[in-house]
């Protein structure tokens, strides 16, 4: 479908796991594919929480700044692309995925988890 949109005169851009990250699939089927932007990273060297299991199942304040998060980098990339590609015969189509929507376990201090009216991290520890 992305290539068809391009053939019809649209600018087509995408980032992250559009076709679920199969090796080479996104690059093959999406014109102007921008990559993973760090996927689920950045990840701390050691787990923050005491919850056992895979490092993805960890939570806490990490990293230090929003601009270190993949979602921030994806949004910045999209803004830049939109600014450069304003004129086409039909328009621009973006496919992108905000990763923290699917794995909201770590965020900077000013991120959304720290704004909740309860201690989210402490609740997960119980």
Image (cartoon, rainbow, N blue to C red):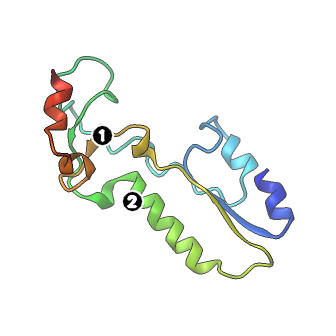
The 10 Å Cα crowd at callout 2, few under 14, some 14 to 19, many 20 or more, is some
Q: Earlier in the sequence, mark 2 or mark 1?
A: 1
- In terms of image quadrants, where is residue 18? top right
CA–CA distance between discs 2 and 1?
15 Å
Residue position for label 2: 72
Q: Secondary structure at mark 1?
A: loop
Which residue is found at the position 80% from the left and 63% from the top? 6
**Quarter of the figure with the C terminus:** top left
Q: What is the total number of numbered labels drawn onto the structure image?
A: 2
Please tell me the numbered disc located at residue 43.
1
Which residue is found at the position 29% from the left and 58% from the top? 66
Which residue is found at the position 20% from the left and 54% from the top? 64
Please tell me the numbered disc located at residue 61.
none
Q: Position of residue 92 (x, y in %)?
A: 69, 69
Query: Toward the viewer: 124 or 69?
Result: 124
- Compared to residue 47, the image places residue 118 above or below, namely below
- In terms of image quadrants, where is residue 90? bottom right
Taking 3 as reference, is 98 left or right? left
């Amino acid at each position: 479908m992305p290539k068809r949109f391009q053939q019809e005169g649209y600018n087509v851009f995408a980032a992250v796991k559009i076709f679920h990250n199969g090796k080479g699939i996104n690059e093959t089927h999406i014109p102007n594919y921008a990559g993973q932007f760090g996927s689920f990273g950045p990840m701390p060297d050691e787990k923050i929480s005491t919850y056992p299991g895979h490092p993805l199942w960890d939570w806490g304040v990490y990293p230090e700044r929003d601009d270190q998060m993949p979602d921030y980098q994806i949004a910045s990339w999209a803004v830049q692309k939109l600014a450069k590609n304003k004129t086409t015969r039909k328009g621009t189509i973006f496919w992108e995925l905000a990763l923290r929507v699917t794995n909201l376990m770590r965020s900077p201090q000013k991120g959304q988890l720290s704004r909740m009216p309860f201690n989210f991290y402490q609740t997960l520890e119980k």
